[in-house]
Image: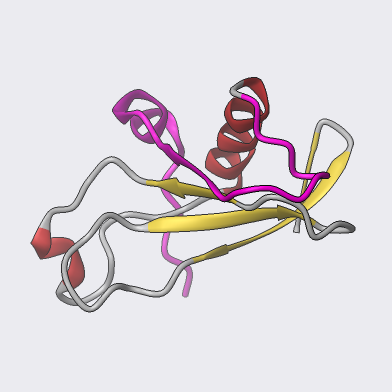
Amino acid sequence: MITVDGTVYRWRVRKRPSRPAPLSFAVQQADRHGAVLIATLPTSDVTEWVGPPAAHVVPSMVAEMVRRGRAEGWQPDQPGPTVTLHMSQEIWAQSPTPTATR
C-alpha cells in the first residue's frame, strides 16, 4: 500500500513474463475497484531476466506514476479500461535503488 496525495493505493510488481519484457507494476485505488494503472519501466534488456532483476520498483516510482496517470486522465475511483503508462528514462534514473541488507 502507498498513500499518494491523500489517497491510498495498492500496488504490486507484475510477475516476470515468459519472454524478455520490461518490468511492470499495477496500481489500483485501495478502497475501490476502479480502473487499473499499469506502469512499465523503460528497459527490456534480456540480461535483466537472468539471475536477480537489475531493475527495481521503489515507492517513489509508484507515487510518480500515480501522479502522472492522474494528470493524464486515469480515474482510479471509477470503473474503466486499464491505463498503461511507460516510465520515462528520466524518472527511472532519478529513483533511488534499494540497497542490499544483511
The front one of 89 and 21 is: 21
| Residue, far front | 80
24 relative to 59, above or below: below
Q: Is residue 75 left or right of residue 50?
A: right
Q: Residue at x 42, y 28 (%)?
A: 91
Q: Is residue 35 left or right of residue 57?
A: right
Q: Quadrant of the N terminus?
A: bottom right
**x and y percent of residue 77 in the render?**
83, 44
Question: What colour scheme has been applied to the protein in the rendered image?
Answer: secondary structure
21 relative to 39, above or below: below
59 relative to 73, above or below: below
Residue 92 falls within the magenta-colored stretch: yes
| Extent of the magenta region | 73-102
Q: Residue at x 60, y 49 (%)?
A: 81
Q: Residue at x 64, y 21 (%)?
A: 71
Q: Which quarter of the figure has residue 16?
A: bottom left
Q: Which quarter of the figure has residue 24?
A: bottom left
Q: Residue at x 86, y 41 (%)?
A: 7
Q: Is residue 21 left or right of residue 83?
A: left
Count of labels in the image: 0
**x and y percent of residue 17 in the render?**
28, 73
**x and y percent of residue 8 in the render?**
84, 49
Q: Main secondary structure of the magenta part?
A: loop
The front one of 19 and 102 is: 19
Residue 35 falls within the magenta-colored stretch: no
Q: Which quarter of the figure has residue 62?
A: top right
